[in-house]
Amino acid sequence: MLTFFVLAALSGAVAVALGAFGAHGLRRHLSAERLATFETGVRYQFYHVVGLLAAGWMTVQWPQTRLAWVAGWLFVLGTLLFAGALYGLALSGRRSFGAVAPFGGAAFIAGWLCLALAAWGI
């Protein structure tokens, strides 16, 4: 699905921009702990750009592989929930954002498992 390539490219661009913002714009404004939380969000967003590219490639190579499609959407959901929660936590200091992150982490794990199962079935 070409949508995953587009989403991966956009997510990568956003991750670069947020990484630069964290390194140059937030360093003076956030505690070391909150800056590390922000950087973790950026790092996991980048990791899952690779997952999205893999899911996109699999859906184009093997269009009958539904699990790769599911994996791609789980990576999108995981990025929104996990990285988004960490960005919210770091920028606002509200601990309630931390409660959302595990749902994003679970989506990431499920996405990787779906990708593995899709590859196994090909």
Image: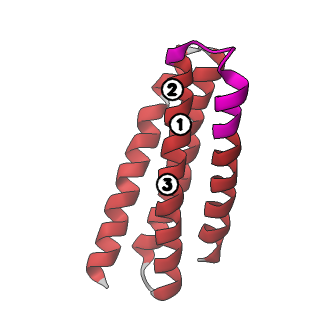
Position of residue 3 relative to residue 59, above or below, is above
Give the residue pinned by disc 2: 37
Between residue 75 and residue 47, name the one nearer to us: 47
- For badge 2, the amino acid type reads Thr
Q: Main secondary structure of the magenta part?
A: helix
Query: Residue at (50%, 38%) from the top-left corner?
Result: 82
> With 4 as the anchor, is 108 left or right in this view?
left
On whether residue 14 falls in the magenta region, the answer is no
Quick check: marks 2 and 1 in contact, CB under 8 Å? yes
Give the residue pinned by disc 1: 41
Give the residue pinned by disc 3: 48
Choose the circle earlier in sequence order: 3 or 2.
2
Task: Point out residue 42 in the picture as x, y percentages from the top left corner.
Answer: 56, 40
Q: Secondary structure at mark 1?
A: helix
- For badge 1, the amino acid type reads Gly
Task: Point out residue 51 in the picture as x, y percentages from the top left corner.
Answer: 46, 62
Choose the circle earlier in sequence order: 3 or 1.
1
First to last magenta residue range: 19-33
- For badge 3, the amino acid type reads His
Q: Secondary structure at mark 3?
A: helix
Between the C-alphas of marks 2 and 1, the distance is 6 Å
- Where residue 122 sits, quadrant-wise, is bottom left
Position of residue 45 relative to residue 88, above or below, is below
Query: Among all residues in the image, which is located at the extreme left?
Result: 120
> With 56 as the anchor, is 122 left or right in this view?
left
Query: Residue at (38%, 44%) from the top-left corner?
Result: 106
Say whether residue 7 is visible. Answer: yes
| 10 Å crowding of disc 3: few (<14), some (14-19), many (20+) | many
